[in-house]
Amino acid sequence: MEKIMNNSYINKDEINNKIYDYIAGYINCSTDQLKEEGTHFVKNKKAAKNHVKILSIRDTNIISLSEEKYELGKQLLSGKTRDELYEGNNLKTLCDIEGFENSLAFDAEGNTNTTIVLCAIKDNEIIAIAGAAPTGKLMEVGIDVKKNRLPKQ
């Protein structure tokens, strides 16, 4: 419990429950679905036509779809990771970028254990990438800058 200014108390669980209730009502799912790990598809009868909304909380992804998009959305988005849900084909294009082997590496199937990627773009060209991957209790960090973009010495 947290003490607030007028000496009354506010319970964190009550606040969290209200937040979950609000979100569940907004995207037309149950609060249980918001707390269950995995990806859940919701047919949102209150949504406008062609509605697709993706919400992630902790280890849960909720995909809220209007009735006419539900089956297609479920077909296209089932089995996707959280990154794939948000980034789609943009992730696949990273496999083809050369010159950033220290910051972003893929295996033969196109998988990577890199969990954080930041890139610098100038004139519509990726000129630097920083990537981090878990290695036990630490994160391994790699940073690559295109050679033609390094400062001249």
Image: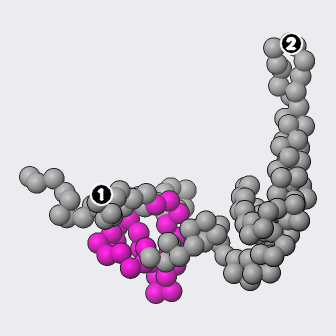
The residue beneath circle 1 is 122
The mark closer to the camera, 1 or 2, is 1
Residue 126, quarter of the rendered image = bottom left
Residue 41 image point, x, y percent: 81, 71
Residue bearing mark 2: 6
Where's residue 87, x and y in %? 56, 68
| Residue name at image x 84 percent, y 73 percent | 67
Residue 152, label in figure? none
**Mark 1 surroundings: few (<14), some (14-19) or many (≥20) residues within 10 A:** few
Q: Which residue appears at 43% of the width and 61% of the height?
A: 131
Which amino acid type is shown beneath numbered disc 2? Asn
Q: In this rendering, is residue 127 above or below 101?
A: above
Of residue 91 and residue 3, the one placed in the foreground of this image is 91
Q: Main secondary structure of the magenta part?
A: loop
The kind of residue on which mark 1 rests is Lys
**Residue 134 relative to residue 77: left or right:** left
